[in-house]
Image (spheres, rainbow, N blue to C red):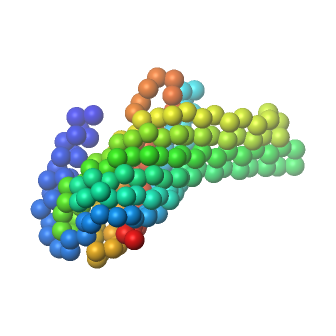
Amino acid sequence: MKKNIVCLSAFLLAVSSVHGQDSSQAGFYGFVTAGPTTFNYPSGLSVETNGYQLGLGYEFNQSVAVEGSYGSLFNFGASNASASESAEMTMVNLSGVFRVPGEKITPYLKGGISSLATDYQSSTFGNERYTQALWTYGFGGEVNLDKRTAFRLEYLSTLKRAGYVDGSIFQLGIMSRF
């Protein structure tokens, strides 16, 4: 935990001194991100795969925004002549975002709540749906290409609690202001 805080502090200090194009403004924006995800189940099962998120946000000012997103974190399917099974994990997230305004690079912190759903279907064992609410937190940075468009790099993690799924998401994407 201390290592993460030190890394985050160094990241925020380094990127807040970079200069370039200012892009912060009030209004709506959308984003698409994709990258590796890791989720650990209470049973000891660990799933590592790639996922994506689609989101919509609203900037109140240069420093404060709120975001909602939907993500498909993994989708698995297998079958043979006698059986088939599939699993999909999806996440709906609502977060508050605090940005450190920069001209070219804008670092940010975020925190919120997510609904995580795992759907499992098996021709042998039947169907099962497992859902839970999780606290999430993360950090990232946006590289502003112009006043409307930015590349986005983000790390998002769930607050680890005994008996619950915990995970981390590392994604790269693009955002556009309307």
Percent position of residue 50, x then y: 52, 54
**Outermost residue, top direction?**
162
Percent position of residue 145, x then y: 29, 75
Task: Judge from the rendering whether residue 52 lies leftward or rightward of residue 121; answer left or right.
Answer: left
Q: Quadrant of residue 21?
A: bottom left
Q: Nearer the viewer, residue 76 or 157?
A: 157
Quarter of the image with the N terminus in it? top left
Residue occupying the point 26% across, 41% down: 4
Residue occupying the point 54% across, 50% down: 73
Percent position of residue 92, x then y: 52, 47
Task: Judge from the rendering whether residue 83 lies leftward or rightward of residue 32; answer left or right.
Answer: right
Residue occupying the point 50% across, 59% down: 54
Is residue 76 in view? yes
Decide: is 79 above or below 151. above
**Outermost residue, left direction?**
17
Q: Nearer the viewer, residue 124 or 172?
A: 172
Percent position of residue 17, x then y: 12, 62
Decide: is 102 above or below 76. below
**Outermost residue, bottom direction?**
146
Q: Quadrant of residue 123?
A: top right
